[in-house]
Image (cartoon, rainbow, N blue to C red):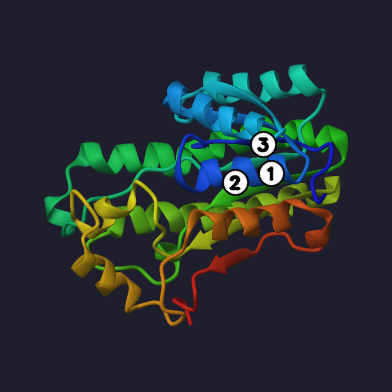
Amino acid sequence: MKLEDRIAIVTGAGSGIGAASALAFAREGASVLVVDVNEAAAKATVEQIELAGGRAIAAHADVTRAADNQAIVERASAAWGRLDVFLANAGVPQWPADVENVEEEAFDRIMAVNVKGVWLGAKYALPVMKRQGRGVFLVTASTAAIRPRPGLQTYCASKGAVVTLAKALALEVARHGVRVVSIAPVATDTPMLPAFMGKRAADAEARARFVATVPLGRLNRPEDLAAAAVFLASDDASMITGTCVEVDGGRCI
């Protein structure tokens, strides 16, 4: 197993990419702290992991709060003795709108979750990894950082910020044997997808428009990102750091 006896934290793990990644980490042998602002959703993911024979603990956290980020790192360390992988996955979407129609409150919320949440995760997880002399800090970014879609300027800016943040952190911690990598998915079948389409539900017409922009002819499944995260967290990727890995079916070509 690629992550046997590793200790991992996954934020936003109550659904979508986070849940799929937590399940994949556990299948590969990791013990996983499943973190979500929705505690019931985190517990549901833990139940799936345990039913499959894996090890996991649910934790409630708001990633925009320093105290919550510190608490989840301390909880994983207290439960299992160390921290090998942190997947900063929690994020929020933007409803499509021209910039003049975006409320300042929406901007602040997107930046708080998508950027500050990653920064706070790094602030508390990376010192632990540096002391250990090993660890992997992963960030769920987006192809929006590389090839923006119209009307999503705030979301695009937030994902561009974390791609650059990951590169800067990678340089900062490389001498300690720690790696930092961002992962850029194209549109993915998750509960957030309709919001990017400006829909209450992802109807066939809107889905077809998005699929038409992906050369491989389909949207991501959460499992596509989970597989990438497992690889990047494993020793198979031991020389990959600072990179933004595009899991996008060719969207960014």
- Note whether 211 is above or below 201 in the view shown: below
- In space, the residues marked 1 and 3 are separated at their CA atoms by 12 Å
Secondary structure beneath dot 2 equals helix
Kindly check if marks 2 and 3 are in contact, taking CB atoms under 8 A apart as contact: no
Give the Cα distance between marks 2 and 3: 14 Å
The foreground one among 216 and 232 is 216
Q: Residue at x 50, y 28 (%)?
A: 44
Q: Which tag, 1 or 3, sits closer to the chain's start?
A: 1
Residue at numbered disc 3: 52
Check residue 75 in the rendering and tell me which mark sits there, or answer none: none
Report helix, strand or loop for mark 1: helix
Q: Are marks 1 and 3 in contact (CB under 8 Å)?
A: no
How many neighbours does mark 2 have within 10 angstroms: few (below 14), some (14-19), or many (20 or more)? many
For the question of whether residue 245 can be seen, the reply is yes
Callout in the foreground (1, 3): 3
**Please, which residue is most extreme toward the front here?**
51
Q: What residue type is disc 2 on?
A: Ser
For the residues carrying marks 2 and 3, which lies nearer the camera in this image? 3
220 vs 85: above or below: below
Percent x, y of residue 104: 21, 40
Contact, CB < 8 Å: mark 1 with mark 2? Answer: yes
Q: For marks 1 and 2, give the CA distance.
A: 6 Å
In the picture shown, does residue 182 fall above or below 126? below
Q: In percent of the image, x 56 and y 21: which residue is there?
A: 59
The amino acid type, in three-letter code, at marker 1 is Phe
Badge 3 density bin: few <14, some 14–19, many ≥20, Cα 10 Å: few
Q: Observer-nearest residue: 24 or 64?
A: 24
Which residue matches tag 1?
A: 25
Which mark identifies residue 21?
Answer: 2
